[in-house]
Image (tube, rainbow, N blue to C red):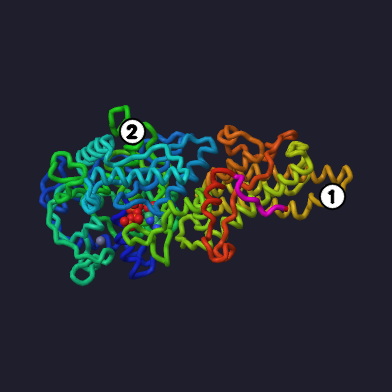
C-alpha cells in the first residue's frame, strides 16, 4: 500500500530537506495531476451524467452523503474496543527494519491496550496488487500469486520472530477483500463520486504513479528510480476528491486529534488548503489487480483497493464477505499507525472515500517518522535497509523492540547505529534492570532462602521510594496512552534507576554483614521493596519487552499463567506478599559484548545471545 508515495518522497528527500518536502509535497502532487492532460469525457456515473468539469463540481456539491464528518458519522466504537492497524506492506520486496518499526510500535500499543482491559483487534497484512508486483514476480521467474505468497509469508515469519501479537492478517488478494472492494466501489459509484476521463502523462512503473514532467530528470527519468518514465494514455476512472475539500477542512478543524502528532495535522491542513484534485482510481494497462465492476478491462488503482484492507480484515472467514458485516465487527478503527510517507492517503483520500460510501471515519491517524540510514529513509527501493532478521538473530526480539521504541522519539526520524544499539540495550536492559534483579535475588537467596519476609505494602510504609515508583508508573501509563512510546520506556527505566539508587544508598549487603536483628530486618525489607519495583517494571515494560518481562516474572516466582493474566492494575504497589519464594538468580538479559570487549572479534557471541532469549541461564550478570 505504501510504496508509491514513498518513492516521490524519497526523490524530494534527496534534493531537499525532509521538512521542505513535507511542506511542498502537496503542491508537487497537485501539479502531477495538473500537468497531466485530462480530458473529461463523461461525468459521474450517477443519474445526471452530462459531462463537464463544472457540472461535475456542481453534482459533487449536491452529494447526498449524510455521514459527512466525524460527528455525524454512525458511531460504532464500543468503549472497550480498540482496533488498530499497521500499514499493509507492499510485497515488492521482503520486509525490512522500517516495516518492522511500524509493526513493533503497533504491537506495543496493542499490548498496552490489552493490559488496560480493552478488547483489541490488531490488524496488519500485505498489499499485493499493482504492476510493480507483477513485474517483481516476473523478474523472479514466478507468477504474481506465488510471489505474493512468498513475500507475504516472509512478513508473517518476521512478525512471529518479533513477537507481534496481531489478531488479523489481511492480504489484498484474499477473495473476501476483493468482494468488499467491489461492494465499496459500487457504493462510491452510486453516490456519484466516480467518473471517467482520458488521462495522458508520464508514468513511472516503479512508483506506480503518473509524474509531473517538471519533477523528472533528463530523458524523463524518474529521480527516484533513475529510469525513464513511459508515456501513457488511457481512460481512467476518477474519484471526486475535490468534492470533499470543505468537509475535510471542517473535520480537521473540529477534530484536532484526528491526525497526530500535531505537526502532521498542520502538514495535512496545509496540503488541503492548496486545493484537492480528483485522482485516478483505475488502471487500464494493469492486469494484476481487482477488476473494476462494470468494466473488467480496467483494474482498481492499488491504493483505492489497499486502504479497504482495514475493513475487509474485520470480515470473518466463515461469513459472506459484506461491507456491513465487516463494519459491524469493529469499524471504525481507533488508530491507523503509519509512516509519514503515506499520511496523505490516510488523512485525506481515505476519509473522503469513507464519507463517499457513508462509512465512519477512523478515530486517529498517527504518522510516525522514518528510520534512516546515513540520513536517508530506509526503504526497499533505495535498498539501504537494515535486516530485522539479522538483528533478531543476533540480539533477540526484546532488544530490537526496546531499542527502536526507546531510542526514536515516536513521530520523529531516527538513525540506526550498532554502537548505540549495543550501548542502550546493555545499559538499560542488562544493567539497570537485569543487574538490579540479579543482585537482589542473590542477596535474597543468601540471606532469606529466596523467600520474602514481608508483604511489599507493609515493607513500604513511609518509604519515599514507593511514592517514586507509583508516580513513574502512572506517568508511563499516560505516555503509553498518548503514544509517547519512548517516554513510556524512559519512565519505566527511571523506576530501575531509582531502584539502583535505593539499593546502593541502603547497601543491604553491609547491613547483613553488620548483623543484629534490626539491621537484618531492614535489609530484608529493602529486598522486598526492590523486588516489588521489579515486578512493577515487568508489567509496565511488557508491551515493549514481553519476553524479558516474562523472565522477570519467572524469577519472582510466578507462573507463566500469572504473567499472561497480568493487567495494568498489577502495576499498583503491593502485589508481592510475604512468603513468596523466588527463583535462584539467573540473568534475564545477556549483556552484549562490544567489538572492543571481544578483542576485535564479533560484536556479539551469537550463541550466548540466542540462548539467552530462550533461557535466562546462560551468562552471569555483573552482580553485587
Ligand atoms: N525507513 C522507514 N522508517 C519507518 N517506517 C518505515 C520505513 N520504511 C517503511 N516504513 C513503514 O512501512 C510503510 C511503507 O511500507 P512499504 O511496504 O511500501 O515499504 P518501503 O520499504 O518504504 O517501500 P519502498 O522503499 O519500495 O517505497 C511506511 O508507511 C512505514 O509505516
Ligand atoms: Zn519512480
On screen, residue 29 above or below 567: below
The answer to which of 596 and 461 lies nearer the viewer is: 596
The answer to which of 353 and 228 lies nearer the viewer is: 228
**Of marks 2 and 1, the one in the foreground:** 1
The reply to whether the magenta stretch includes residue 621 is yes
Left or right: where 51 falls relative to 157:
left
Reading the image, the residue beneath label 1 is: 513
Residue at horizontal 47 percent and vertical 43 percent from the top: 163
Reading the image, the residue beneath label 2 is: 315
Give residue 172's position: percent from left, percent from top. Answer: 29, 42
Q: Which residues are the magenta region?
A: 616-623
Left or right: where 246 falls relative to 582:
left
Residue 359 lies in what quarter of the image?
top left
Give residue 326's position: percent from left, percent from top. Answer: 33, 33
Q: Which is nearer the N-term, disc 2 or disc 1?
A: 2
Q: Is mark 2 within 8 Å of ligand 1?
A: no
Residue farthest along the bottom direction in this orientation: 218
Q: Taking the image as four quarters, which one is ligand 1 found in?
A: bottom left
Left or right: where 568 falls relative to 165:
right
Real-space CA distance between mark 2 and mark 1, rounded to the nearest whole angstrom:
65 Å
On screen, residue 393 above or below 123: below
> Which label is found at residue 179?
none
Residue at horizontal 42 percent and vertical 66 percent from the top: 375
Amino acid at each position: 500500500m505504501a510504496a508509491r508515495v514513498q518513492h516521490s518522497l524519497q526523490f524530494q528527500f534527496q534534493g531537499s530537506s525532509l521538512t521542505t518536502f513535507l511542506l511542498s509535497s502537496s503542491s508537487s502532487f497537485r501539479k502531477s495531476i495538473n500537468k497531466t492532460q485530462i480530458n473529461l469525457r463523461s461525468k459521474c456515473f450517477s443519474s445526471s451524467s452530462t459531462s463537464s468539469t463544472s457540472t461535475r463540481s456542481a453534482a459533487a456539491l449536491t452529494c447526498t452523503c449524510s455521514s459527512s464528518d466525524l460527528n455525524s458519522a454512525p458511531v460504532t466504537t464500543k468503549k472497550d474496543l480498540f482496533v488498530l492497524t499497521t500499514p499493509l506492506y507492499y510485497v515488492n520486496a521482503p520486509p525490512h527494519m522500517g516495516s518492522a518499526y511500524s509493526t513493533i510500535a503497533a504491537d506495543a500499543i496493542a499490548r498496552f491496550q490489552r493490559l488496560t482491559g480493552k478488547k483489541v483487534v490488531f490488524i496488519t497484512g500485505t498489499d499485493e496488487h499493482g504492476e510493480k508486483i507483477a513485474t517483481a514476480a516476473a523478474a523472479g521467474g514466478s507468477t504474481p500469486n506465488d510471489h505474493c505468497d512468498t513475500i507475504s509469508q516472509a512478513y508473517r515469519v518476521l512478525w512471529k520472530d518479533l513477537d507481534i501479537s496481531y489478531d488479523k492478517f489481511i492480504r489484498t488478494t484474499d477473495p473476501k477483500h476483493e468482494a468488499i472492494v467491489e461492494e465499496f466501489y459500487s457504493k462510491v459509484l452510486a453516490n456519484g463520486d466516480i467518473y471517467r476521463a482520458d488521462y495522458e502523462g508520464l508514468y513511472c512503473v516503479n512508483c506506480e504513479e503518473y509524474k509531473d514532467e517538471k519533477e523528472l530528470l533528463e530523458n524523463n527519468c524518474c529521480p527516484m528510480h533513475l529510469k525513464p518514465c513511459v508515456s501513457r494514455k488511457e481512460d481512467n476512472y476518477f474519484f471526486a476528491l475535490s468534492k470533499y475539500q470543505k468537509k475535510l477542512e471542517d473535520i480537521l478543524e473540529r477534530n484536532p486529534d484526528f491526525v497526530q502528532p500535531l505537526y502532521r495535522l498542520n502538514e495535512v491542513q496545509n496540503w488541503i488548503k492548496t486545493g484537492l484534485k480528483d485522482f485516478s482510481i483505475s488502471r487500464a494497462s494493469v492486469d494484476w489487480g481487482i477488476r473494476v465492476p462494470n468494466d473488467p478491462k480496467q483494474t482498481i488503482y492499488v491504493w483505492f483497493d489497499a486502504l479497504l484492507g482495514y475493513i475487509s480484515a474485520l470480515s470473518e472467514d466463515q461469513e459472506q464477505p459484506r461491507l456491513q458485516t465487516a463494519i459491524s465487527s469493529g469499524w471504525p478503527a481507533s488508530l491507523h499507525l503509519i509512516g509519514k510517507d503515506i499520511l496523505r492517503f490516510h488523512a485525506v483520500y481515505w476519509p473522503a472515500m469513507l464519507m463517499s460510501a457513508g462509512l465512519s471515519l477512523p478515530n486517529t491517524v498517527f504518522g510516525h517518522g522514518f528510520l534512516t540510514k546515513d540520513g536517508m529513509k530506509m526503504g526497499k527501493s533505495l535498498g539501504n535497509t537494515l535486516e530485522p532478521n539479522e538483528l533478531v538473530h543476533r540480539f533477540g526480539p526484546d532488544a530490537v523492540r526496546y531499542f527502536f521504541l526507546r531510542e526514536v522519539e515516536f513521530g520523529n526520524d531516527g538513525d540506526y547505529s550498532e554502537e548505540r544499539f549495543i550501548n542502550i540495550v546493555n545499559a538499560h536492559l542488562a544493567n539497570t534492570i537485569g543487574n538490579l534483579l540479579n543482585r537482589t535475588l542473590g542477596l535474597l537467596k543468601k540471606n532469606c532462602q529466596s523467600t520474602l519476609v514481608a508483604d511489599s505494602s507493609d515493607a513500604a510504609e513511609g518509604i519515599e521510594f514507593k511514592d517514586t515508583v507509583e508516580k513513574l508508573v502512572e506517568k508511563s501509563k499516560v505516555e503509553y496512552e498518548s503514544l509517547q512510546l519512548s517516554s513510556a520506556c524512559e519512565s519505566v527505566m527511571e523506576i530501575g534507576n531509582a531502584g539502583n539508587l535505593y539499593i546502593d544508598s541502603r547497601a543491604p549487603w553491609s547491613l547483613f554483614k553488620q548483623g543484629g536483628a534490626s539491621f537484618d530486618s531492614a535489609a530484608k525489607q529493602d529486598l522486598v521493596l526492590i523486588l516489588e519495583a521489579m515486578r512493577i517494571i515487568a508489567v509496565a515494560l511488557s508491551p515493549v519487552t514481553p519476553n524479558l518481562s516474562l523472565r522477570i516474572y519467572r524469577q519472582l516466582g510466578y507462573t507463566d499463567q500469572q504473567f499472561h493474566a497480568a493487567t495494568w492494575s498489577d502495576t499498583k504497589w503491593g502485589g508481592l506478599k510475604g512468603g513468596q519464594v523466588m527463583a535462584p538468580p539467573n540473568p534475564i538479559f545477556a549483556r552484549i559484548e562490544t567489538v572492543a570487549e571481544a578483542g576485535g572479534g564479533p560484536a556479539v557471541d551469537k550463541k550466548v545471545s540466542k540462548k539467552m532469549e530462550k533461557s535466562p541461564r546462560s551468562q552471569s550478570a555483573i552482580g553485587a
